[in-house]
Amino acid sequence: MAGGPLEGVRIVDLTSVVVGPLATQILADHGAEVIKVESKAGDLVRVMNGKSVTPGMGAKFLHLNRNKRSIVLDLKQPAGHAALMKLIERSDVLVWNVRPLSMARLGLRYEDVCTINPKIIYCGMFGFGQDGRYRDKPAYDTIIQGSGGMAALHHRATGEPRFVPMVVADKVVGLIAVQMIAMALYRRTQTDEGCAIEIPMFENMAKFVLEEHMYLKTFDPPLGDTGDPRLIDPLSKPIPTKDSWICISANTNNQVFAFFDAIGRPELKTDPRFSSVQARFVNVKDYFQIRIDALKTRTTAEWIAIFDRSDVPAMPYHTLDSLIEDRHLQDVGFFEMKNHPTEGRTRNMRLPNKWSCGVRQEWDPAPKLGQHSIDVLREIGYSEAEISAMIADGATIDGRIRTSSETDGTG
């Protein structure tokens, strides 16, 4: 038993790449037993992330699949499909992130699954809601960023549409899936019933974007245009200092007035353009320009020291490399060096959140493809002869990690 708030919950994970693996890893990190079901080709993200120490163990895969066990099942073979159904019968949650048509072709619709396990939480993440015309279209992160309005925010701000250079749509929807699954598990404790959950990426990202940027078209008739002007203004970005950049967010009157004092412009506190939240909103371009003109006169470290004394929200701008070296992250022990059985020494990130009631006790590295196939099949009742037959027929593979004595025949 792993410990943690989800101890005792078994999850069958049919997901791949980012959106699903992120969700199931969070659940695994908090105590759930996650069994990752892969094809013989494995999760695509195993091989789409540049160099790795051993094939099929890319960095992104390592960061999204710890605390899981991997079983290979060829679901197009009757033996592989039957093994999956046995596993589902003994589980609490089934998570998947392919198009619903694919699940139907595999005989894995909710109607199929709840027949053998009426208490199953059946959670699907896919591109588009099934009541609309896009329902059968494939979707990846960039497809959703572009169609869901996120790339348009860059267009409004810079004159050129572009994607956020991280899989933000996948990650947001993965986090939403964790919330939905947790609520469904709670509901089951009250009703003793399972349920199906549909999590469409497009609709979730449309909501995510438009909560701020529907803006004045919220009203009928519209009171103006879309787009929060503070956020899409071209000057809404890290601000150059004498030696680098700084991130500052002075919004309340107290913060802004302290900022004006800090830059030696106390007269701006009574300037009608900047004397209230509403006035600064209307004159946001002028306010941003004042910040730019002032902050280039000192170094980032000098400004941070001044703003800390004045309680003005500010932080230094980090590159990806300097973020890894951040002293606060070192203080809290955010990065942990772990020994992976095949990848050697790796840098990992600990859980950011703390629980007073207990957390998962052990850390398990991301698995090799099919590393736990044999163990899982044994646990759900397969004999050694049946397992050997499945391996011979290609319905599964034995991906167990061998010691040097086992591989060289001396053991």
Image: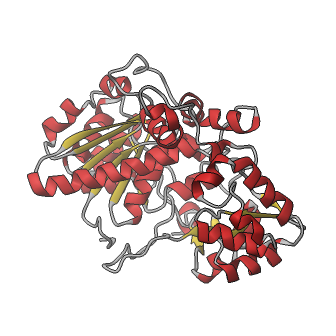
Please indicate whether residue 405 sits to the left or right of residue 315 in the image.
Answer: left
> Which percent across, then down, holds residue 313?
64, 70
Image quarter of the N terminus = bottom left
In front of the other: 406 or 9: 9
> Which percent across, then down, holds residue 97?
41, 37
In front of the other: 227 or 243: 227
Q: Is residue 214 visible?
A: no
Please indicate whether residue 165 sits to the left or right of residue 132 in the image.
Answer: right
Q: Is residue 293 visible?
A: yes
Q: Residue at x 76, y 72 (%)?
A: 266
In front of the other: 52 or 410: 52
How many labels were placed on the picture? 0
Q: Residue at x 66, y 42 (%)?
A: 232
Colouring used for the render = secondary structure
Q: Residue at x 42, y 75 (%)?
A: 354
Please indicate whether residue 240 sits to the left or right of residue 177 in the image.
Answer: right
> Which percent across, then down, holds residue 176?
40, 48
In front of the other: 135 or 389: 135
Where residue 128 sits, quadrant-wise, is top left
Considering every residue shown, the one lying at the far top of the view is 133
Where residue 118 sits, quadrant-wise, is top left
Where residue 238 sits, quadrant-wise, is bottom right
> Which percent across, then down, holds residue 286?
76, 51
Considering every residue shown, the one lying at the far left of the view is 191
148 vs 402: above or below: above
